[in-house]
Image: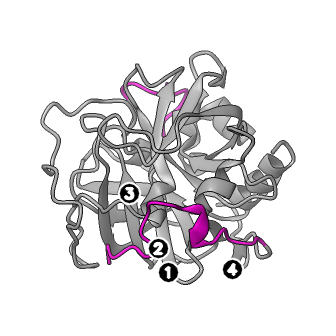
């Protein structure tokens, strides 16, 4: 078992972009051990298309109580705009995983699941990833952002260790701006414990509309968290588990990403995430060296 870090939130000194950077979005969101795995198709909740995605799209103002675990279609808000789809090469392909913006000194970083970003068959990080934040029905409000660098733990690269199923993605700038300048970013939470109320937002491969869910996390093992959220099927790997969103600072804390055990789980209604401990903190620091 890997040692757990003391409770911290990273980074502590980042300045959060104000609501002015988010023209067109609401300022507050009312939405109260596999080895040598492939990086996309057929593993966990990445890539597989649900021919009849559930739930059906709801009105954009749909909400759900925080303790139900039922999926719903979230409103288009500043908070939700930081979550988007991952494509291969361009948006003419199918989106196959989810990622989100986290704060970094370079203001250009995403977090997702390692199995979304590392091609174990090729033995190398993927070099063709594109990120479409706030993607809905083919619309990309801020366009496509090219991933310049994939940072994963070498132990994941070697063995697909489900406790290390986390990746940081460094983006190229777009139109002279970094993604955090445009959308803001959430902080990274280390050693937050196993019992947290979170919001999860992700993109099932069978839908061009995101889904969200609120519920409390539970302990699955000393290195894995578990949550009950309906309809999180293939494509939702990498979805951020967001705690403590503050509408005043426009910031929440990512305490996990959908992945880990069985690539996030083999049931649509039960999902997993690797616990964020010392290893994730070190990976985050290493990613900053190349951002």
Q: What residue do we see at 63% from left, 58% from top?
A: 102
Q: Are marks 2 and 4 in contact (CB under 8 Å)?
A: no
Whether 30 is among the magenta residues is yes
* Mark 3, residue position: 201
Q: Main secondary structure of the magenta part?
A: loop
Whether 117 is among the magenta residues is no
Give the residues drawn in magenta, as a range: 14-42
Q: Secondary structure at mark 4?
A: loop
Q: Residues within 10 Å of mark 4 (few under 14, many from 20)?
A: few
- Name the quadrant of the C terminus: top right
Q: What residue do we see at 41% from left, 69% from top?
A: 26
Q: Are marks 1 and 3 in contact (CB under 8 Å)?
A: no
* Mark 1, residue position: 247
Q: Mark 1 or mark 3, which has the lower sequence index?
A: 3
- Mark 1 or mark 3, whichever is nearer to me: 1
* Mark 2, residue position: 27
* Whole-percent x, y for residue 22 in the image: 54, 62
Q: What residue do we see at 28% from left, 78% from top?
A: 66
Q: Mark 4 or mark 3, which has the lower sequence index?
A: 4
Q: Mark 2 or mark 4, which has the lower sequence index?
A: 4
Q: Mark 1 or mark 2, which has the lower sequence index?
A: 2
Q: What residue do we see at 21% from left, 73% from top?
A: 64
Q: Mark 2 or mark 3, which has the lower sequence index?
A: 2
Q: What's the distance in space between the residues labelled 4 and 1, CA to CA?
A: 23 Å
* Mark 4, residue position: 7
Q: Are marks 1 and 2 in contact (CB under 8 Å)?
A: yes
- Mark 4 or mark 3, whichever is nearer to me: 3
């Amino acid at each position: 078992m890997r040692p757990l870090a003391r409770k911290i939130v990273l980074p502590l000194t980042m300045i959060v972009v104000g609501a002015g950077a988010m023209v067109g979005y609401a300022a507050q969101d009312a939405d109260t051990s596999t080895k040598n795995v492939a990086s996309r198709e057929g593993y966990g909740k990445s890539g597989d298309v649900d021919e009849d995605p559930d739930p059906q799209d709801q009105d954009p103002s749909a909400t759900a109580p925080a303790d139900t675990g039922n999926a719903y279609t979230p409103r288009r808000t500043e908070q939700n705009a930081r979550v988007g789809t991952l494509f291969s090469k361009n948006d003419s392909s199918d989106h196959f995983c989810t990622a989100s913006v986290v704060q970094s000194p370079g203001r250009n970083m995403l977090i997702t699941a390692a199995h979304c970003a590392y091609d174990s068959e090729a033995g190398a990080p993927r070099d063709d990833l594109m990120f479409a934040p706030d993607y809905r029905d083919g619309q990309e409000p801020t366009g496509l952002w090219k991933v310049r660098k994939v940072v994963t733990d070498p132990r994941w690269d070697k063995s697909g260790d489900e406790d290390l199923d986390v990746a940081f993605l460094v983006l190229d700038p777009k139109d002279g701006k970094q993604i955090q300048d445009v959308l803001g970013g959430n902080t990274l939470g280390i050693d937050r414990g196993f019992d947290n109320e979170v919001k999860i937002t992700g993109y099932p491969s069978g839908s061009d509309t995101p889904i969200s869910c609120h519920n409390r996390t539970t302990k699955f093992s000393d290195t894995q968290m578990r949550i009950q959220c309906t309809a999180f099927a293939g494509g939702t790997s990498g979805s951020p588990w967001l705690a403590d969103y503050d509408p005043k600072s426009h910031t929440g804390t990512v305490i996990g990403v959908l992945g880990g055990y069985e690539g996030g789980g083999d049931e649509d209604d039960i999902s997993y995430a690797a616990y964020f401990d010392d290893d994730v903190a070190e990976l985050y620091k290493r990613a900053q060296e190349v951002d």
